[in-house]
Image: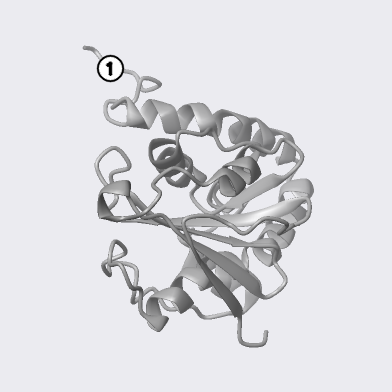
């Protein structure tokens, strides 16, 4: 694949951008607790080698916070499927940061766990290598995403998290069909918005679906 075409936007997507029927989405936050760590960046791609990165800046830091109507309209558009890797986290982060329920969704991590049962490697880096033949770097994963000015290395890393999801989903969806697990995957995806809200309420641990003597 050629070098990605990266468009950086502060506060919101510009009007008029179309990602087609399916958009790959990822988020960058200040940490790994969506209840505590603020949403900093939302990455989007139509799978065409182009990535749009939207920086979310809090009002207290001179930004517009959750005032991003174009982005929120896309996240909630029932006609556009949102494609994630580990959607559970991103949906929770988007709900906490923007106040919207992202749907409908697909999660490549869930799909991988349903059909790639011959391995315990279901990270995005693993899927890019195994299914797309692409090596991506995770070096910038733990950098400061709340910085007012993001580095070129951060922007390239953020873009790589969405540029290959369409290709990965194409491979995984074929495996789901082959193994007769597409219907099961679909039901899992439908539940993800509720799962994200349960996480925000503190039900990640203990999990209300687990057996407990308490």
Instruction: Specify whether 97 is left or right of 21.
Output: left
Q: Residue under label 1, please give it.
A: 212
Which residue is depicted at the point 55% across and 46% down?
A: 110
Vertical placement of 19 versus 196: above or below?
A: below
The quadrant in which residue 5 appears is: bottom right
Which residue is depicted at the point 40% across and 49% down?
A: 64
Which residue is depicted at the point 71% across and 62% down?
A: 171
> Who is closer to the viewer here, 44 or 190?
44
Please identify the quadrant where the N terminus is shown. Answer: bottom right
The quadrant in which residue 181 appears is: top right
* Coordinates of residue 79 in the picture (x, y in percent): 77, 40
Instruction: Specify whether 41 is left or right of 35.
Output: right
Number of residues whose C-alpha sits closer than 10 Å to that of mark 1, classed few (under 14), some (14–19) or many (20 or more): few
> Who is closer to the viewer here, 134 or 141?
141
> Who is closer to the viewer here, 108 or 45?
45
Q: Residue furthest bottom?
A: 2
Q: Residue furthest top?
A: 214
Residue at disc 1, secondary structure: loop
Instruction: Specify whether 82 is left or right of 148.
Output: right
Instruction: Specify whether 25 is left or right of 156.
Output: right
Residue 161 visible, this orientation: yes
* Coordinates of residue 187 in the picture (x, y in percent): 65, 30
């Amino acid at each position: 694949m050629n070098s990605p075409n990266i468009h950086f936007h502060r506060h919101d997507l510009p009007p008029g951008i179309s990602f087609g029927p399916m958009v790959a989405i990822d988020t960058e936050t200040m940490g790994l607790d969506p209840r505590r760590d603020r949403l900093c960046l939302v990455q989007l791609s139509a799978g065409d080698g182009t990535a749009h990165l939207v920086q979310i800046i809090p009002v207290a830091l001179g930004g517009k916070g959750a005032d991003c109507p174009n982005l929120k309209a896309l996240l909630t558009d029932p006609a556009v499927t949102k494609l994630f890797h580990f959607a559970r986290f991103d949906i929770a982060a988007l709900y906490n940061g923007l106040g919207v329920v992202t749907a409908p969704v697909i999660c490549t991590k869930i799909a991988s766990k349903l059909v790639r049962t011959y391995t315990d490697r279901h990270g995005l880096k693993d899927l890019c290598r195994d299914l797309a033949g692409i090596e991506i770097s995770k070096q910038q994963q733990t950098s400061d995403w709340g910085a007012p000015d993001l580095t070129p290395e951060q922007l390239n890393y953020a873009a790589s998290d969405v540029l290959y999801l369409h290709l990965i989903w194409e491979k995984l969806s074929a495996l789901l069909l082959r193994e007769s697990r597409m219907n099961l995957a679909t039901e899992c995806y439908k539940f993800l918005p509720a799962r994200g809200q349960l996480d925000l309420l503190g039900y990640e641990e203990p999990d209300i679906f687990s057996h407990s003597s308490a």
